[in-house]
Image (cartoon, rainbow, N blue to C red):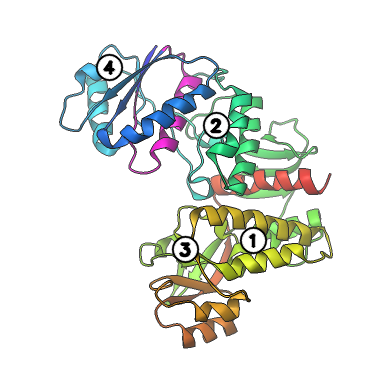
């Protein structure tokens, strides 16, 4: 089978390309792969081709440069499949037109967003990157050892991403089912704390079904869940695990992502790290040094219980992830509540600063004039894709802290 895959998406060129290529090779018996790329994507080609060493057996690969002015009849000639998921709209339209004209089948790979943004297959679970068609069971194409060994270099300094990538890879190697767009998935953490797809006979400790979580067969709220698992009464660990989305109260209540085109970025204080800002990798963040100091200090203090150990270890992991993608803001070594108003005004100009403490909000509004101050609120998540990230993270915590 000859498959044509154009690359060059408006965002995440490498990630969308390798995801589309691997899912296509898993789902179809491809022996020849034609990669089409626009000029701007040339710099990504070397990394994409290098990454394909992850394959046990490579198909014959042909690479062709295209541009939006040229006709594409020759590029799709004699093709058996076109998968235009990893390119820009102009090429989707042109290639789809040619495919319809020549009766060439088309398929599409869906991509997950939210906390999954920036990760790519095989480091996200297969059920999050479904296709419309393809085989019932996937082709065994992934060189597991190479894929596992590549995580550190591919996700350098992204400590949370490394954890999720490793668990997702293990899941994909064990599960052979292909997934199609529109399929309902029920996710399970079994009694050995392994993550898997639930079947009717499965004895599960935890189940995620659409937006509902059940524990030992009974539906629970996230706060109740962490109490049962870790004897946590702090009211923060459920937020830290990403079971809640972040809301912002200004003149009215907003979703955090609604505001990001309005501000240069969001200034992260320590409280926001414990409230799950790490689960917003698509948002520009400013990280003051005082937050680093507070998290490091919390991690080094004696812990009273298991929940506290987990909370501060998670915060440290999140901090490393945030450092890898944030603009660092220098501050004196002190607590952020007191230090943030003293940051150079030019460094936080046109940013958004959040707190859940009303007294802090009032104080900051009185002394900070060139940034917006908002109230932080949390609301329970309902989205399966986002909650699946939290469930996979939870399985890692259970294996590492409860065994």
For the point 66% across and 69% down, the residue is 294
For the point 33% across and 42% down, the residue is 10
Is 381 located above or below residue 98 in the figure? below
Graded by Cα atoms within 10 Å as few (under 14), some (14 to 19) or many (20 or more), the crowding at tag 1 reads many
Direction bottom: furthest residue:
366
Q: Nearer the viewer, mark 3 or mark 2?
A: 2
Region of the chain picked out in magenta, as a range: 5-31
Disc 2, disc 1: CB below 8 Å?
no
Is 143 located above or below residue 166 in the figure? above
Is 19 located above or below residue 282 in the figure? above
Graded by Cα atoms within 10 Å as few (under 14), some (14 to 19) or many (20 or more), the crowding at tag 4 reads few
* Residue beneath disc 1: 239
Badge 2 element: loop
Q: Earlier in the sequence, mark 4 or mark 2?
A: 4
Q: x%, y% of residue 50?
A: 46, 26
Q: Which mark is residue 122?
A: 2
Disc 3, disc 4: CB below 8 Å?
no
Q: Which mark is residue 256?
A: 3
* Residue beneath disc 4: 103
Disc 1, disc 3: CB below 8 Å?
no
Badge 3 element: helix
Q: Earlier in the sequence, mark 4 or mark 1?
A: 4
Q: Earlier in the sequence, mark 3 or mark 4?
A: 4
Q: x%, y% of residue 152?
A: 59, 38
Is 97 located above or below residue 341 in the figure? above
Along the line of sight, which residue is nearer the eye, 59 or 168? 59
Q: Which mark is residue 110?
A: none
Along the line of sight, which residue is nearer the eye, 220 or 276? 276
Q: Earlier in the sequence, mark 2 or mark 1?
A: 2
Please indicate whether residue 231 sits to the left or right of residue 288 in the image: right
Q: Nearer the viewer, mark 4 or mark 2?
A: 2
């Amino acid at each position: 089978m000859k498959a044509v895959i154009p690359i060059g998406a408006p965002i995440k060129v490498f990630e969308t390309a390798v995801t589309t290529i691997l899912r296509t090779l898993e789902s179809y018996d491809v022996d020849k792969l034609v990669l089409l790329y626009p000029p701007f994507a040339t710099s990504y080609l070397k990394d994409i081709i290098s990454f394909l060493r992850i394959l046990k057996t490579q198909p014959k690969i042909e690479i062709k440069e295209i541009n939006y002015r040229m006709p594409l009849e020759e590029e799709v000639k004699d093709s058996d499949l076109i998968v235009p998921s990893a390119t820009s709209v102009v090429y989707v339209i042109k290639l789809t037109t040619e495919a319809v004209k020549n009766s060439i089948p088309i398929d599409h790979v869906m991509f997950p967003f939210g906390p999954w943004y920036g990760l790519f297959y095989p480091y996200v679970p297969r059920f999050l990157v479904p296709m419309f068609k393809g085989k019932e069971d996937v082709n065994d194409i992934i060189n597991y050892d190479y894929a596992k060994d590549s995580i550190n270099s591919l996700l350098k300094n992204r400590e949370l991403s490394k954890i999720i990538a490793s668990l997702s890879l293990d899941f994909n190697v064990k599960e052979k089912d292909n997934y199609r767009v529109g399929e309902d998935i029920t996710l399970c953490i079994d009694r050995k704390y392994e993550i898997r797809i639930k079947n009717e006979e499965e004895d599960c400790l935890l189940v995620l079904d659409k937006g509902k979580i059940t524990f030992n067969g009974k539906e629970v709220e996230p706060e109740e869940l962490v109490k049962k698992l870790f004897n946590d009464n702090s009211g923060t660990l459920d937020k830290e695990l990403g079971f809640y989305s972040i809301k912002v109260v200004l003149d009215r209540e907003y979703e955090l992502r609604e505001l990001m085109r309005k501000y240069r970025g969001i200034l992260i204080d320590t409280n926001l790290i414990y409230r799950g800002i790490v689960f917003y990798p698509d948002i520009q963040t400013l990280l003051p040094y005082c937050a680093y100091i507070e998290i490091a200090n919390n991690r080094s203090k004696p812990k009273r219980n298991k929940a506290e150990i987990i909370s501060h270890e998670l915060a440290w992991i999140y901090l490393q992830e945030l450092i890898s993608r944030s603009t660092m803001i220098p501050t004196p070594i002190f607590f952020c509540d007191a230090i943030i108003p003293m940051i150079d005004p030019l460094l936080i100009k046109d940013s958004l600063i959040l707190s859940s403490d009303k007294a802090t909000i009032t104080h900051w509004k009185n002394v900070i004039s060139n940034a917006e101050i908002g109230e932080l609120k949390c609301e329970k998540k309902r989205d399966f894709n986002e909650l699946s990230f939290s469930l996979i993270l939870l399985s890692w915590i259970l294996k590492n802290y409860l065994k």
